[in-house]
Amino acid sequence: MKFSVGDQIIHPAYGAGKIIGTEDLEIIEGFEHYYVITILDQGVTVRIPIRKMEDLGVRPVMSQAKLAQILETLSSMPR
């Protein structure tokens, strides 16, 4: 999944965050591209390799419409 600076995300371990930038950091194999994410409830900044976002389970924040649809489905009688 492709994210952009300014996107709000949910990280499974850290919770809600916002992508505030990107950085290229040098590692043993060369340079790697990272998203810089501010974790809203904790006031911390984390850097996550762009190529690992999906593997880590990072996802976009759910829209109000999608949330309403899910809640409606969960509250309806089974078929």
Image: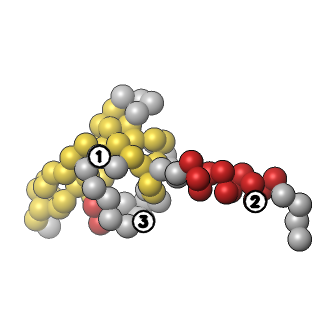
- Expressed as whole percent of the image width and height from the top left, the position of residue 48 reads 30, 53
Q: CB of mark 1 within 8 Å of CB of mark 3?
A: no
Residue at far bottom of view: 79
Q: Amino acid at mark 2?
A: Thr
Q: Relative to 62, is 42 above or below?
A: above
Disc with the residue nearer the chain's start (1 vs 3)? 1
Q: Circle 1 sits in a helix, a strand or a loop, which is it?
A: loop
- Expressed as whole percent of the image width and height from the top left, the position of residue 73 reads 75, 59
Q: CB of mark 2 within 8 Å of CB of mark 3?
A: no
Residue at mark 2: 73
Q: Amino acid at mark 3?
A: Asp
For mark 3, does the 10 Å Cα neighbourhood hold few (<14), some (14 to 19), or many (20 or more) residues?
few
Q: Circle 2 sits in a helix, a strand or a loop, which is it?
A: helix
Q: Nearer the viewer, mark 1 or mark 3?
A: 1
Q: Amino acid at mark 1?
A: Gly
For mark 1, does the 10 Å Cα neighbourhood hold few (<14), some (14 to 19), or many (20 or more) residues?
few
Which residue is drawn at the image coordinates 12% and 62% (left, top)? 31
Which residue is at the front of the view, 34 or 7? 7
Label ID, residue 55? 3
Residue at far front of view: 65
| Number of numbered labels in the structure image | 3
Q: Quadrant of the C terminus?
A: bottom right
Residue at mark 1: 6
